[in-house]
Amino acid sequence: MRMLDRSPAVHRTVVSDRREPVPGIAVLGLVAPRLAEMTLPGQFAMVIPPGGGQAATALGIYEAEDTRISLMLVVVGPRTHELAALPTGATLDLLGPLGNGFELEALGENVALIAGGVGIASLLLPAQRLASRGKRLTLLYGARTAQALVDADRFSELGAKVVCATDDGTRGHSGFVTDLLRALPKRAFSGIAACGPSPMLRAVGRAAAYLEIPAQLALEETFACGVGACWGCVVPLTRESSQAPKFPHVETEETRTFVHARVCKEGPVFWAHELRW
Amino acid sequence: MGARTSLVNAKNVTLSQLDVSVKLGALRLSAPTLMGSGCYGSGEEYAPFVDLAALGAIVLKSVTRHPRLGNAPPRLVSAPSGLLNAIGLQNPGIDAYLENDVAKFADRPCAVIGSVAGFSVDDYADVTERLAARDEIDAIELNISCPNVGTEGETFACDPALAEAATRAARRVTGKPLIVKLSPNVTDVAAIARTVEAAGADALAVINTVRGMSIDVDRRMPRLGNASGGLSGPAIRPIAVLAVWEVAQAVKIPIVGQGGIETARDALEFILAGASAVGIGTGNFTDPRAPLNVVAGIRDYLAARGHAALGEIVGKANPRFLGAR
């Protein structure tokens, strides 16, 4: 069998399709054969702005099949507006695949996927992989409002039980997605894979600890380089973590127990119990 | 490529024969582009995306005498046309650095410049001596201008006497080319440049980041863990071009101009103001191919205007340019 080279590179891709499942959220389909083949669930790409002049944008890789990948983005500022407006056939250069993905085997047989907002984008590939291995899946999906729950049916199609929460109560539980988690009995799942804004992931981590469920969190951070060069995106991580970078070897009262790990390089997926945030 | 190499200018120089090499003291670079310290790791992080052999030099992340954990996150905030950062010189300290890291720099296909930061004159002397002694290191950049480590880090670049003392201390312990990186956060950057030149610097890097802050009005607190940070990117380019202009009227040693360079035309502003070479930091975050595009664009510019070498246009916009071309 041919060994697949998974080392990242600059990829020139071509926009194949685009849709706006709800106003303000865009899914950009790209012809990117090598990326589609290489990408592991939970990895991301740095998208080079076609017009230059601004930093690259880090986006989780949403779909990867045959020769196509897709990226999901919230259209908020000039960078995302530029990307969302790209016509079919336009070229888009990106660096990828970057970071380490989920350790799916460590999640067991009965897995909860927990998504906040467009954090859903980093969970479809894990869901597909887990479903193909016959794991039981539950998606706990939270967003501001019913309209912002994007593509939940993609997960039901994989056999996942889908439970929703909205801030305004327009669909499912009225409140946070983490409320759903806290209401469950201990060890209700064998593992959790989550992606969303940091406050949500912190809450998932706390709930998972209480419920005694191992949880992997895909962090959303502001990146500058995205490739491990600038040390701008660090989180405190326990020294004992297998992901802890060897440097720096700082030993003070305050820092004996943790190191600063780069979300883009050592992450973006970390075990919740190893984060010291 | 055929069309490019056949392009012959008035002096009968083909594009590939154009001389874009540059000398910073005894350090000769095949291209006039230096990757800014702290933005490029040790180079290996970018090796999958760009041919390191085409870069002029990599300026390594700054190292200090003692290990540093760096600032608490968040360390990055985007700003209009720029990036505000406060990393805080996270590094393993010179002992561990010499033991674990420096040997890996031997196989870099471009020049490798070590960066030294410190909190006392003694720090600069000690770390410079030990780092410069290694064969893997081609030159030293003295970072006397980090704005993100309390007041101590930048004091050296803001006080002529301290800038001179740090430079002199480093000069005494190494014969390798010594580049001193200046801060824009001063009243008279030219005055500092003069004292640093007199203290024995071979070249100056102009500028480091501009101090700045961003406040989250909902949470009513600064966005950066360190509260204040250093602003980089296109937002600071005019500040940097002016600093180069002023320094180029004050010193004869070569200047590495930096601050928001993303394209060849950006770089040419610095060169015409008086920089012999350019630094690219934040520009790599937009596109890692930026340094290559900058060099290609400079070649095109020189060819189109009938020049044979980059040196011919250094300081050309600056009537009181003092340096040698």
Image (cartoon, rainbow, N blue to C red):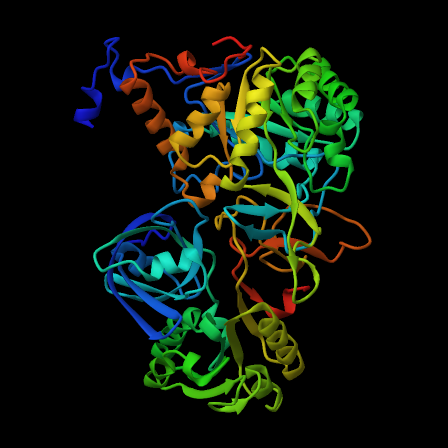
Residue B166 locus on image (x, y percent)? 74, 22
- Image-based side of B187 in relation to B264, left or right: right
- Residue lying furthest right: A253
Identify the residue shown where x is 46% and y is 82%. Answer: A109
Residue A135 locus on image (x, y percent)? 41, 82
What quarter of the picture does the N terminus of chain A occupy? bottom left
- Image-based side of A94 in relation to B150, left or right: left
Does the rendering let one see residue A92?
yes
- Residue lying furthest front: B319
* Residue B225, picture quadrant: bottom right
Q: Is residue B136 above or below residue A94?
A: above
Residue B80 locus on image (x, y percent)? 52, 49
What quarter of the picture does the C terminus of chain A occupy? bottom right
How many numbered discs sit on the rendered protein?
Answer: 0
Residue A241 locus on image (x, y percent)? 62, 60
Does the rendering let one see residue B104?
no
Identify the residue shown where x is 42% and y is 28%. Answer: B55
Identify the residue shown where x is 45% and y is 57%. Answer: A58
* Residue A79, picture quadrant: bottom left
- Image-based side of B80 in relation to B215, left or right: left
Q: From the viewer's side, name the closer residue of B257 and B143.
A: B257
